[in-house]
Image (tube, rainbow, N blue to C red):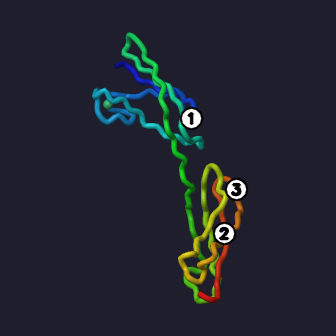
Amino acid sequence: MQSVDVDLSIIGMGIVSFSDVGINGDETVHDDIWTAKVTHPGINHGIQNVNVSISDGWSNTEVSTELIITNLAPRMTALELNPTTVSRGDTVDVSATVYDAHGVSTVVVDLTGFSCFSKSRRRFCQRNFMGFGLWSCWFGNSSC
Ligand SMILES: [Ca+2]
């Protein structure tokens, strides 16, 4: 084989040339395993159809295949409890900085593990719909 090119335009990467010479993510030279190391920074996910073009220098073979891109889960980059030590009846302010490229619809503090909060879940107050967002709320219960 002379070249393996994959059209990754559907995820904004254009034509990506794979390697069998031990570079660009390829681990072993001339083992007929062609590799490219790519990173998808976009937000689209799901099954993407991609075209692969393989050439041996005399003829080309075109193959279509499916690339499955999973959706990255929301990430929490910071969590702050203030104060961190409380007495029964005190209130705790909770702030969380969360991120998801598709937006975050809810952030919830699950207090069901505490007997005094067994029927309650305190939802965060939303301050930012897209990108990095600081969410905050508080909880307190005098019976704890
Ligand atoms: Ca190889």
* Image quadrant containing the N terminus: top left
Badge 1, how many Cα within 10 Å: few under 14, some, many 20+?
some
Q: Secondary structure at mark 2?
A: strand
Quadrant of the rendering where the C terminus is positioned: bottom right
Residue that protrudes farthest toward the top in the picture: 58
State how many labels appear.
3
Q: Secondary structure at mark 3?
A: loop
Q: Earlier in the sequence, mark 2 or mark 3?
A: 2
Q: Amino acid at mark 1?
A: Ile
Residue depicted at x 36% and y 19%: 2
Whether label 1 lies within 8 Å of ligand 1 gets the answer no
Above or below for 86 versus 122: below
Label 3 sits on residue: 129
Relative image position of residue 97 (x, y in whole percent):
61, 63
Q: Amino acid at mark 3?
A: Phe
Residue type at mark 2: give it.
Arg
Q: Residue at x 67, y 68 (%)?
A: 124
**Tag on residue 123?**
2
Q: Residue furthest front?
A: 119
Q: CA distance from mark 1 to mark 2?
A: 35 Å
Tell me whether circle 2 and circle 3 mark residues in contact (CB < 8 Å).
no
Label 1, secondary structure: give it.
Answer: helix
CA gap, disc 2 to disc 3?
A: 15 Å
Q: Which residue in the protein does label 1 denote?
A: 11
Place of residue 30 in the rendered image (x, y in percent of width and height, measured from the top left) = 28, 26
User: Residue 87 sits in which quadrant?
Assistant: bottom right
Given this view, does label 1 or label 2 mark the residue nearer the observer?
2
Q: Quadrant of residue 43?
A: top right
Which badge, 1 or 3, comes first in the chain's sequence?
A: 1
